[in-house]
Amino acid sequence: MRQETKCIEAGYQPKNGESRMIPIVQSTTFKYDTSEDMGKLFDLEAEGYFYTRLQNPTNDMVAAKLAALEGGSAAMLTSSGQAANFFAVFNIAQAGDHIIASTSIYGGTFNLFNVTMRRMGIDFTFVNPDCTNEELEAAFKPNTKAVFGETIANPALIVFDIERFADVAHKHGVPLIVDNTFATPINCRPFEWGADIVTHSTTKYLDGHDATVGGAIIDSGKFDWMAHKEKFPGLCTPDESYHGITYVEKFGNEKAFITKATAQLMRDLGSIPSPMNSYLLNLGIESLAVRIQRHCENAQKVAEFLESNPAVSYVTYPGLKNDRYYELAQKYLPNGSCGVISFGVKGGRKGAEEFMKHLKLAIIATHVADAHTCVLHPASSTHRQMTDEELLAGGVNPDMIRFSVGIENVEDIIEDLSQALEKSQL
Ligand SMILES: *Cc1c(COP(=O)(O)O)cnc(C)c1O
């Protein structure tokens, strides 16, 4: 099946007389005839469901669709993108370990790594995604367990050189984890470039309609854990909390990572999505391929319009020929990058505030990457307590607008931008 077809068909094929749509199994628990039957499930000897905190059929059908879309061997859903990134890293790193991450990642992920996971005793080194291979090599320590980056960084719109980072990670015997939220598997499949684990905030384009918060982890199944046994004892030596199972031996490279994350992390931390939310996510994914194409077409036209508008001081969009990341985008995202653009309004913080005041169609929201065009001016909202100097030191321009292009008619979006930009300069 091709990607467009997988969006509709993968993960669930109804048998004769079964429901056309995936069933919502809204049940906490499952019934068994004998306690021996249930015991086999607890021992991971048989496949099946016993409690929704660990696994649920609706969630698994949607996870299987995402595994197919990314070309992976196994997948799991989580209750948020934050939980997905936390689990993906925590599944192979513990107190005393070290992770290398790109500096250009979502702010929530940066805080999770730099504050919360540091408190748990995991050390992080952040590297510029444009660093040389020598600089990247220098960040490795004997206790490094993974490298982490984002295909297209939110909100910096920096394209991550997946192949280069994967090669260096593999040279040091560790996997590359890539957050593929902004590109989606329609525009980029990081496994094809050597990534080992992919994560998503499904809250964004995958759901696409502002309906559900969620996350996902997908494993390529290709990383050879046993070849680096001493680095990954959690996967390669017996788990005493599961009757001495060694995940890689019992489930192979294809299923070990996701089985361990389910059996240990979901069991103990419980960040499962509600089956109803997974149903809604599936509905969103059905139209993903057509929506993404429209987001990218619209964003390209909006970016070109902004570039030629006299009230705009700069535009950042990897689809523009003179963008710093145009070449990398041509390599990794030949069919389009995403619908998010950032740009500056002449007149600094004040000009940007005026522009925001006059928008009519674009809604002001702390969100990106969904069907509705939405806009945020960090300097007057999420970062409003900071002075211009503090903002610049943190890499945020006071005049910077983050604009997430939706799938409305692009002429309406451009008309709205045009009138608001004109009024911003009066
Ligand atoms: C939004 C986002 C997250 C966090 O996801 P939530 O679903 O909000 O928890 C992680 N990574 C990226 C790239 C995001 O855009």
Image: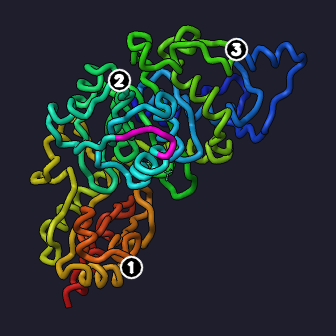
Q: Name the amino acid type tagged 1.
A: Lys
Q: Residue at x 74, y 37 (%)?
A: 25
* Residue placed most toward the observer, 313 or 420: 313
Residue behind mark 3: 243
Helix, strand or loop for disc 2: loop
| Neighbours of disc 2 within 10 Å: few (<14), some (14-19), many (20+) | many
- In this figure, which residue is indicated by the disc labeled 1? 360
Q: Magenta segment range?
A: 119-124
Q: State left or right for residue 193 relative to residue 267.
A: left
Q: Position of residue 346 (x, y in %)?
A: 17, 78
Question: Any atom of ligand 1 within 8 Å of the CB at mark 3?
Answer: no
Residue 24 spot, x, y in % from top left = 71, 40
120 within the magenta span: yes
Q: Residue at x 33, y 42 (%)?
A: 150
Q: Quadrant of the C terminus?
A: bottom left
Q: Front-most of 212 and 99?
A: 99
What's the residue type where badge 2 is placed?
Answer: Val
Disc nearer the start of the sequence (2/1): 2
User: Would you say residue 122 is visible in this rendering?
Assistant: yes
Residue position marked by numbered label 2 in the rendering: 174
Residue 20 seen in render: no
What is the C-alpha distance between the residues marked 2 and 3?
27 Å
**Which residue is at the front of the view, 276 or 32?**
32
SS class of the residue under badge 1? loop
